[in-house]
Amino acid sequence: MDEHDRAVGAILIGESLMVQCERSADQIRDPHDPQRWRAMREIQDDYPEIWRQLDRAREVLAARGANTMAYEEMRPHVRRTIASDTDDHASTVDADALEDARRAIAELKLAVPGADWKAIARRTRELVAIPELRRHSRFAVVGIVSFVTLAVLTWFLSSIPDKKIDERELMRQELADVASQRKVKIQYLQLAIGERCDAPVAQEYVKLLVMDGQGDHAERFADRYVGRCGEDTVVENWANAPRPPR
């Protein structure tokens, strides 16, 4: 089995989100990081999505008769949220919650028969090491590769139904997939725009921020962008648009 398998794909998405959670956790633990509160918001969105992807992988594997008992035994006892309060009533990251997710990913990997995880990781590294890509920022490359990989995997997972479900559940899954893809694209566009003046990229980025409920971030970005690059009515209109319901 490789990354085109539904169960493997779901595990890879969960693993990618896990990496993002670890990055956010590092920001949150740094009291001097100006993005720590934004990182807390992102990690609270990403952590439940990890479990949604892992549960989906377990469902596929169990339907095939794979042994997912270890995952099933630990699943009811994992932390439901990743935020915890300290003695001074400040929010921080629950390290045990991250460890739960790591163990769950490891257990599901063991349950996938015939998956060469080392080969999958090697193919990803080789893609990043392509000469044309190495001329650009490594962070931008990682963002682009992650965006393409997650988008393809999410499409592949959603295009092949595991079982017949009712319309309400189908709509819920589709909306969750759209939200997940939007977050990945936001990260990609953030890397792409950087400090450049690129109107189409900036307009798409601020629009997605507003649609994702990150209106305050959209306003701050618009202020910086207009101050740096000059007036852009599309960017400003999106930044000041009414907020969608959460």
Image (tube, grey):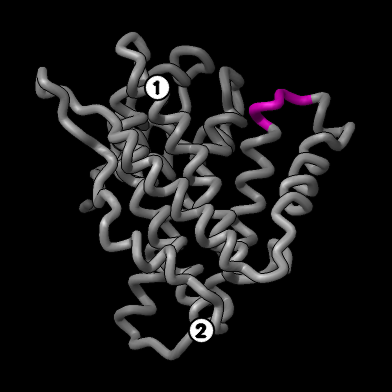
Mark 2–mark 1 Cα distance, whole angstroms, equals 39 Å
Residue at image coords 38%, 87%: 165
Q: Is residue 68 above or below residue 83?
A: below
Type of amino acid under label 1: Gln
Location of residue 40 in the rendering, given as x and y in whole percent from the top left corner: 30, 32
User: In the image shown, does 86 or 164 lie closer to the viewer?
Assistant: 86
SS at mark 1 in the image = helix
Q: Do the numbered discs 2 and 1 sit on residues whose CB atoms are within 8 Å?
A: no
- The span picked out in magenta is 136-140
Farthest residue in the top direction?
Answer: 32
Which is nearer the N-term, disc 2 or disc 1?
1
Location of residue 34 in the rendering, given as x and y in whole percent from the top left corner: 35, 15
Location of residue 69 in the rendering, given as x and y in whole percent from the top left corner: 43, 71
SS at mark 2 in the image = helix
Residue at image coords 70%, 26%: 138
Q: In front: mark 2 or mark 1?
A: 2
Residue at image coords 55%, 46%: 16
Q: Which mark is residue 27?
A: 1
Crowdedness near tag 2: few (<14), some (14–19) or many (≥20) residues, C-alpha within 10 Å = few
Location of mark 2 (residue): 63
Q: Is residue 65 above or below residue 222?
A: below
The reply, left or right, for residue 224 in relation to residue 194 is left
The reply, left or right, for residue 157 in relation to residue 241 is right
Crowdedness near tag 1: few (<14), some (14–19) or many (≥20) residues, C-alpha within 10 Å = some
Q: Main secondary structure of the magenta part?
A: helix
Residue at image coords 53%, 49%: 15
Farthest residue in the bottom direction?
Answer: 164
The reply, left or right, for residue 86 in relation to residue 158 is left
Location of residue 189 in the rendering, given as x and y in whole percent from the top left corner: 56, 36
Q: Which mark is residue 183?
A: none
